[in-house]
Image (cartoon, rainbow, N blue to C red):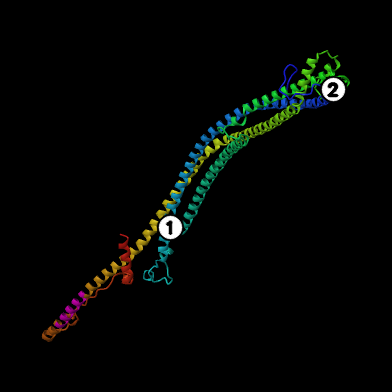
Amino acid sequence: MASPSSSLPFDPAPPTVQLETLVSHLVASKRSLSSIEQVWQANELVTSTRKSLETSVVTSARTSFLRRGISSQLLTLDQVLLKSREVENEGAREYNEATRTLDIANQRLKTTLEALRSTIVDTHLRPEVQDTRTLLDFVDESGVEKLDVTTQESIRAANAAHEEFAESNRTFSKDLERVRSQLTVSQQRTLKTVVEGNGDGPRNGSQSDLVFPETLNDMEDRAKDMADNLESLVKHFDLCVTAIKHTEGGGDAARRITDDLPAGMDVGQYSVQAPSEPISDEEKKEMMEVLENDAHQVEDVVMEIRDSFAAMETMYTLVSEQINTLEQEHASIISAFRLLEKIGARLHPFISQSEVFVMRWDSEKSKIDEHMEELENLRSFYDGFLSAYDNLLVEIGRRQFMEQRMEKVVQDAMTKVDKLYEEDLEAREAFKKEQGDFLPVDMWPGLTESPLRFEISTANNGDGRAPGISKSVIQNAIRRVRGRG
C-alpha cells in the first residue's frame, strides 16, 4: 500500500471526499486490522516449525546412527546364524546317512531272519521230534529285540537333539526377521511420507528428505510479508484517522470508531486524541488521493494475508506429519534396538547350543555306530548259521556217498568170501569121500565140520549212519553253498 509521500498508481478520485466516505474507509480499515490474529498465529507457526525442525535434526541423526548400527549388527548375527545352520545341516546330513545305513543293516538282518524262518529243518535230522521246526526256532530272538529297542532309543534321542537345535535356529532367525521387519516398516513409512509430501518424489530416500529447510524459509518469508502487509494496513488506518480529523465533524466519528480496536492494536489512539496540525490544501488533496487509492487495495491485502496464512497452515501440517513420521520411525528403530538387545542377551547361549548339539549328536552317533556293528555281527552270525545248515546238508550228502561206497566194498568182499566158502565146502566134501573111510573119527573132530564163515557188520550198533535226507534237498543245499561263493 502507499504512504502520504508515495502512492501506487490509482484511478483519479474526486477532489472532495465526503465524511461518509471517509468513515466507511475507516471502518473497513479497522476491520482489516483483525488480520493481526493471523499474523500472530503465523509467527507462532514459524516458531513451532523452527523448534520441530531443530528437534528433527537430532532425532534424524540418532535414527540414522541406530539404523546403521542395527544393520551392521544384523549382518554379524546373520553370519552367526549361517554358521549355526551349517552345523545343523551337517548334523542332519550325518543323521540321515546314519539312519539310512542303519535301516539297510536292519533290513539285511530282517532278511536273514526271514530266511531262517522260511528254512524248515529236515525231519530226518531229528526223527524223534514229530513237530516241524525252522532254523529260527534254534535262535534266541530276545537279543535282536533288545538291540532294536536300544537302537530306537538312540535314534529318538538323536532326532530330539536335532529338533531342539533346529528349533533354536528357527527362533533365532524369526527374532532377526522381527528386527529387520521393524527397519523395513519404518523405512517404508518414511518413503511414503516423502512421496506424498513432495510432488517431485524423494530425492534419495533418506531421513533428511523428511524435513526441508526451504519450507521453514518459505514460512519465514510469508510471515514477514504478512507483517509488512499488516504494517501497511496500520499505516492506512492512521491515514484514515488523519484524514477524518481534517474533515469537518470527523473528530467525534474517529473517536467512536477507534474505541474498540482489535486486541494488541495501539495505533490510531494518539492521533485521534491529538489536535490536528494544519495542512495546506495541496497536502490534503495529496493525502486524499493516496487514501482513496489505498482504500481499494485493503481487501486485496487482507486476502493476501489470509492466503499466506492458509499456505503456512498447509506447510505446517505437512511438516507436522513429517515430524510425526520421523518420530514414529525413531520409535520403530528404538523398538528394533530393544529386540536386538534381547537377542544379544541370548547370543551366548545360542552359540553354546551348537556345541551342545555337536556333543549330543557325537554321543548318540557313537551309540548308533555300536548298534549298527551289533546288527552286522548278528546278521553275520545268523548268515553263518544259515550257511552252516546248508553245509551240514552237503556234509550229510558226502557221508551218504561214503557209506554207499563202503557198503559196495563190503558187498563185493562178501561175494568173494561166499565164493571161497563154497569152494572150501566142495573141497572138504571131496576129501571126505576120498579119505574119510580110512581115517578114524576120533582122530580130528573138526574133520567133519563146515568151513569157517565170515560176516561184515557195522560197529556201535549202526550209530553214525548218515540221515536219509533226499538227494534233491542235498542238491539244493549244494547250489546255495556254491551261490554264496
Name the foreground residue: 87 vs 124: 87
Q: Tell whether position 423 is magenta.
A: yes
| Quarter location, residue 484 | bottom left
Q: Is residue 58 above or below residue 430?
A: above
Query: Which quarter of the image is occupied by the N terminus?
Result: top right
Name the foreground residue: 453 vs 251: 251
Of helix, strand and loop, which mostly describes the magenta segment? helix
Per the image, label 2 sits on a secondary structure element best described as helix
Task: Report the amino acid beneath label 2.
Answer: Thr
Residue appearing at x 22%, y 72% in the figure: 409
**Residue 415 picture location, percent across and down:** 20, 77
Residue 258 disc label: 2
| Magenta residues, start to end | 412-426
Task: Report the amino acid beneath label 1.
Answer: Gln
Q: Which residue is mark 1?
A: 107
Name the foreground residue: 429 vs 120: 120
219 left or right of 351? Answer: right
Residue 306 disc label: none
**Residue 336 picture location, percent across and down:** 60, 35
Name the foreground residue: 322 vs 65: 322
**Residue 13 picture location, percent across and down:** 77, 24
438 left or right of 159? Answer: left
Query: Which quarter of the image is occupied by the C terminus?
Result: bottom left
Per the image, label 1 sits on a secondary structure element best described as helix
Residue 287 visible in the picture = yes
Dot 2 crowding, Cα within 10 Å, few <14, some 14–19, many 20+: some
